[in-house]
Image: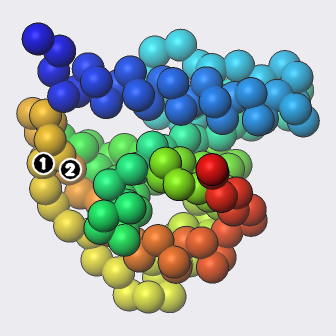
Amino acid sequence: METSFAKDLERGQKIEKEILVWVKKKYDDAYLVDGYCKEWDIHIPCDDKGVEVKYDPMSQQTGNLVVEIEYNDKPSALSTTKAYRWVFHTGKEIIVTTPGILFEVIAKNGLRPARFKGPGDPYYKQAYLINKLLIINTAIHVRKLS
């Protein structure tokens, strides 16, 4: 039986490949980083920058995007990224923003992180649950999916 984590990982990797195709239209040397990399998911060698990809289909039900900052009491995701772009794929749209914009949204709205375990996660995480419209309204680009 496939675990929830394994299914989520497989779906996430499929979405990363989809975003890579989009990134390669501008940066043909872009590639997916193999294995876990806390800095980014897609590397663009020609400019030595990266793209972080987050798949969050639950945002369609909750109205919030999850922006993780800590996992298992260690800094993660937004706290450790070196990506110049942060891409959310919700299943309904692709939202392109930056870590800097995310930090501004968090500060401007006085948001506080929540502590919880995701389905199938063995450890707790801390993450901001940010209203999707706050991110869409400050995004660099939003593409609706059919």
- How is the rendered protein coloured? rainbow
In the figure, 110 relative to 8: above or below?
A: below
Find the distance from the CA under tag 1 to the CA under tag 2: 6 Å
Picture quadrant of residue 5: top left
Q: 10 Å neighbourhood of mark 1: few (<14), some, or many (≥20)?
A: few
Residue 59 falls in image quadrant: bottom left
Identify the mark at residue 117; answer none if there is no mark.
1
Task: Give the image location of residue 125, x and y in percent.
Answer: 20, 50
90 left or right of 17 in image: left
Q: Amino acid at mark 1?
A: Lys
For disc 2, the marked residue is 125
Q: Amino acid at mark 2?
A: Lys
Which numbered mark, 1 or 2, is in the foreground of this view? 1
- Asked which secondary structure carries label 2, the reply is strand
Q: Is residue 123 visible?
A: yes
Whole-percent x and y of residue 17? 61, 24
Q: Secondary structure at mark 1?
A: loop
Q: Nearer the viewer, residue 82 or 43?
A: 43
Q: Residue at x 38, y 87 (%)?
A: 110
Residue at 14% across, 41% down: 119
Give the residue at x 67% y 69%: 139
Left or right: 101, with 64 as reference point: right
> Relative to residue 101, is residue 57 depicted above or below?
above
Mark 1–mark 2 CB contact (< 8 Å): yes
Quarter of the picture holding the N terminus:
top left
Q: Is residue 69 visible?
A: no
Q: Could you say which disc has been placed on residue 76 in the image?
A: none
Relative to 88, residue 72 above or below: above
Label located before the other in sequence (1 or 2):
1
**Residue 40 at x, y = what percent?**
57, 35
Residue depicted at 74% across the width and 27% down the height: 21
Badge 2 density bin: few <14, some 14–19, many ≥20, Cα 10 Å? many
